Amino acid sequence: MPTVSVGRDRLFTALGRSYTQEEFEDLCFSFGIELDDVTTEKAIISKEKHLEEEKPSADDETIYKIEVPANRYDLLCLEGLAQALLVFNGKERIPKYTVADISKASMLKMHVKKETSLIRPFVACAVLRGITFDEASYNSFIDLQDKLHQNICRKRTLVAIGTHDLDTLQGPFTYEALPPPEINFVPLKQAKNFRADELMEFYKSDLKLKKFLHIIENSSVYPVIYDRNRTVLSLPPIINSAHSAITLKTKNVFIECTATDLTKAKIVLNTMVTTFSTYCKRKFEVEPVEVISFDGKSSVYPDLSEYNMEVPLSYITGSIGVPLEVDEVTSLLKRMQLHAEKAGSGEAKISVSVPPTRSDILHPCDVMEDVAIAYGYNNIPKRTLSSLKPLPLNQLSDLIRYEIAMNGFTEVLTWILCSKKENFEMLNRKVDKSTAVIIGNPRSSDFEVVRTSLMPGMLKTVGHNKDHPKPIKIYEVGDVVLLDEKKDVGASNRRLLGALYCGANSGFELIHSLVDRIMEVMGTPFVPVGDKSGYFIELSNEPEFLSGRQAKIIYKGGRIGIFGIVHPEVLNNFDIPDPCSFLELDIESFL
């Protein structure tokens, strides 16, 4: 989930009131976002530079780090957040974004050359006229580009954004793809003129830009944008030209988005222009640009039109589980920046107009989710669906969890993947390829095999918490995976219970008493050896347990578990200084 850093005081100014931290956390929760952290600018800089954090002073700006949904690109900066929260609180109406009404003859034009199809075929453009920046809004403008590049643009592979001071350029523009030696310009924040191939070598030592070089460096041609005078605007997706760099004095901003995915380019362009058109002289108005393809096809961007969908009221109320009237639903949707009204007659339907800022609304389920958020998840009554019946295995697992917890054990959850060493060698076992599912090409040596026992993970847990006050009593109810030729996938899951007692007096009788208690609540009596009407125990000889201090559990003629004192060598392998007793039981055997 992306995290957006905004100045608290500037945000509160935009919202028209101040909040206590608790009040703001409640507002965020109601809107479906989260206040992740509260820090200061100095603390952030110190952390980035790995310096010792200074004590905050009274004049340090407080920074709110707010976690937003990954598909809400309109919330990736303070302007978008403030606009959404103002509408949510009913303090502002939903903005109406418009494209300036100018003729095609008067529009700026971007001509696309055929060679761009070899590397980065699409481009979409727009102009923000009469914009006024201050230092904070300028920084937010740049930061939004970075956030979009990391998010929807997939680190510039799908889309790259270029922003330029239009007053330093002359249209029409051309989008071309040329051999690297033919491209010459002064890149942003540099004073020297570079050829494109020289520039790629130069940026290999740049910590920020070197990670984008691979996108085009092996191509025979590089994408480049020129104005009428053959002045370079940018070498996408790497760097803009210093000639057209925007500043605090910039009044007219030309935005170009080159892309390998045109849909993503449109979303990115719409996000940029709708968010910052609030600073334009004509608020929420954007000037269009005509893009003319090499085959003569003409397209005008941005497309700020709203699209409509009809959603049955029964779908919304049925999914949420709350009986709502049409007027209530439309009111809730308007709080989420969606125009809504009742559609026609007959079956109650909601006609929803989706603005260009809400590219995340793709299906009626997205509309339903917004209604649920605005209504408040905490206000939705809990209920068990009549059609939802838990699996017997899960029901039994929950009952066993409850009983073990009542005996003073704490539940842990450990990785289902582990290393071969942990699953075998560290338990004094031989590597058994006939039972274990081994991962092909594992990313890490820590995740080489699917566990065949709960024991390694639980012993690792104790090893990492050996300084915890004793005794340590933990349990886990989880799956292991074993090879199984009878299954179509070649393996099967088994649900096991693992329980571990670690302490100075961790004797055989302590874990034995837990076995007896589990069998008692399962209604399974203790019977003489050989009797299949209940369970009995027999001496076992497993290498992970101490010889003579271990037993296997026999139920209905088959082994369903084992318990005993863990072998000192095994404890040493996991760096555990205290004695441990362990139980592992196959829960599925009782079904």
Image: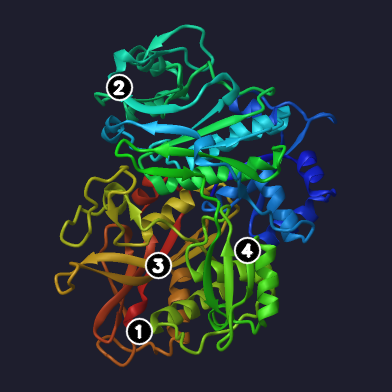
What's the residue type where badge 4 is placed?
Leu
Residue located 39% across and 50% down the image: 571
What's the residue type where badge 2 is placed?
Leu
The image position of residue 202, as x and y in percent, is 39, 13
Could you tell me how far apart the alpha carbons at marks 1 and 2 are, in whole angstroms?
A: 71 Å
How many numbered callouts? 4
Q: Is residue 549 visible to the viewer in this orientation of the structure?
A: yes
Q: Secondary structure at mark 3?
A: strand
Disc 4 packing (10 Å; few <14; some 14–19; many ≥20): many
To which residue does mark 1 refer?
A: 590
Could you tell me how far apart the alpha carbons at marks 4 and 1 are, in whole angstroms?
A: 53 Å
To which residue does mark 2 refer?
A: 178
Q: Secondary structure at mark 1?
A: helix
What's the residue type where badge 3 is placed?
Gly
Q: Are marks 3 and 4 in contact (CB under 8 Å)?
A: no
Work out whether residue 434 or residue 108 is closer to the camera in this orientation and state it: 108
Asked if residue 486 lies left or right of residue 421, the reply is left
Q: Is residue 286 above or below residue 179?
A: below
The image position of residue 302, as x and y in percent, is 52, 45
Sooner in the amino-acid sequence: mark 4 or mark 2? 2
Sooner in the amino-acid sequence: mark 3 or mark 2? 2
Residue located 45% across and 16% down the image: 229
To which residue does mark 4 refer?
A: 338
Where residue 478 is drawn, which disc sits there? 3
Q: Which image quadrant for residue 11?
A: top right
The colour scheme of the drawn protein is rainbow
Could you tell me how far apart the alpha carbons at marks 3 and 4 are, in whole angstroms?
A: 44 Å
Could you tell me how far apart the alpha carbons at marks 3 and 1 are, in whole angstroms?
A: 15 Å
Sooner in the amino-acid sequence: mark 4 or mark 1? 4
